[in-house]
Image (spheres, rainbow, N blue to C red):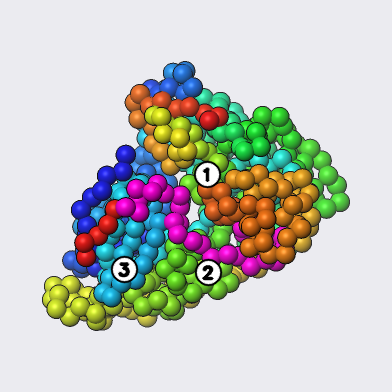
Amino acid sequence: MADVTAIHAADVLIIGAGPAGIAAACIAAETGASVVVIDENPRPGGQIWRHISRHTLPGQAKYWLHRLDKSRARVHTGTSVVDITRGNAHFAIRTAGIVETVLLAKTVILATGARELFLPFPGWTLPGITGVGGGQALLKSGTPMAGKRVIIAGSGPLLLPVAAAFAAAGAHVSHILEQAPGHRVTRFALGLWRSPMRGVHAVIYRSKTMGSRYRTGTWVTAAEGQDRVRAAIITDGRRTWTERCDMLCVGYGLIPQLEIAQIAECDTAFGRVVADAQMSTTVAGIFAAGESSGVAGITSALVEGEIAARSALQHVRRSSLHEHATADAAESVATAAPNALSRRARREAAFAARMNEAFELRAELRQVPQPKTIVCRCEDVVLGDIARCESMREARLHTRAGMGPCQGRVCGPALELLFNWSALPARVPAVPAPVSTFLSNTSA
Amino acid sequence: MSDVEIRVDGRSVRVETGATVAAALLGDETFAFRTSISGQPRGPLCGMGTCFECRVTINGMPHRRACMTVVATGMEIVTRG
């Protein structure tokens, strides 16, 4: 279905149309700069603003999506980035999907967001078991949940809003199970007073899901069923019991998506894209915004998107002084680049740090997968076979773990945690792509 | 709210306009989307295009991610490929 389109050169090319990418696109395009946004999903909005119909979205989402529509940013949905290379004056971004071409850009903003951390447990490959964010994404994509008995488990602040969304859709959320101990969660929740909005939301979510059991210090150790999940085995470390369910959502928080950054040769550290206060990565002309440079939530993503756009425009201005219109626009924006943005970004980062401390994963989770538990779901590789290897690379070569279509996006982070192995950097193509993708070319 | 009609393994299924193929299959009580290389039934895990567990055949094209594809009238879905 892919058609090869004309070649575009852009001032700013933004990868990812979640809040960070949208904010960056609006700020940059509104100055008159040429902006292209690429996103794999059918619609802009990212995970948090995933929708079928816009009128179901919160006001903030409507505002930014409308602003994006009105801006002159070109948005290519259903399109994946498979490679990014640096030329003399431009970056070349190879895409696959609805738009299959090579795009040229003077600057790139990585707004690739985060994905869920999954930890394997016996039975976790059964249909009907999804992530927590995964369950929410399916719900937002139109999956009917009415009457379903749902257990939501894992860790992090996502559990409660997702439970609330399932309850609002008519599901019976029987249990919400947080692995972190109660005292840590309470301390984190008390800290929410610093941000009144967050406090209010937390309370509303909690009350909406009344009728659910919210338990801290509790986690899922196995799932049962034949062709689909029928029950979850649960423990609080002292007692283990079984709860019936039609759907089991388990996720252990969010991790930045680094694949595109790694292919672009940007440094990463501590599982994040390295970026300074101006959101510059270690590669000149490439900037990062949102969860890819550290999971800190939507407010942070919007602020960082704005900062990244201003920095990108400044870079364009410096490197192409002949393009007067863009240069003038960039100058006016860049000189206005306020310290307030950096202060807000720092405050949001502090919030993220408190969150990570509160929801630190307990050591017992490493004991949950058994030798026969599948860890690599693409190649059906069990833990026992992987445990005989010494490193991620050896596991990949000897067992094919991480060699399937997801390219280790699911099992890689789990193995980092289970064995303290270091991750392997992503390789081209960033997502599986047909050979035709690599035949389309640019004349520049 | 208008619906579109698609076919899932030869059956007719009505689904909300704008929904994804994954939502359509789950709404139709189809939980096993594909068969893994060791023969296990699999369905969507991440819901956002990362895990590739929701692969189905759409209009004759194999290995399409059901969670990333919006339904269209007359679409032919084949599971367990």
Between A182 and A383, the one lying in front of the other is: A383
Residue B24 in the figure: left or right of residue B4: right
Q: Which residues are magenta?
A: A412-439
Q: Quadrant of residue A9?
A: bottom left
Q: Is residue A357 above or below residue A229?
A: below
Residue holding disc 3: A91
For the point 59% across and 33% down, which residue is it?
A: B35
Which quadrant, please, contains the N terminus of chain A?
Answer: top left
Which numbered tag is attached to residue B52?
Answer: 1
Which quadrant, please, contains the C terminus of chain A?
Answer: bottom left
Q: Quadrant of residue A358?
A: bottom right
The Cα atoms of the two marked residues, 3 and 2, are separated by 22 Å
Q: Characterize the local packing of mark 1: few (<14), some (14-19) or many (20 or more) Cα atoms within 10 angstroms.
A: many
Residue holding disc 2: A272
Place of residue A271 in the rendered image (x, y in percent of width and height, measured from the top left): 56, 68
Q: Is residue A269 above or below residue A244?
A: below
Between A19 and A340, the one lying in front of the other is: A19
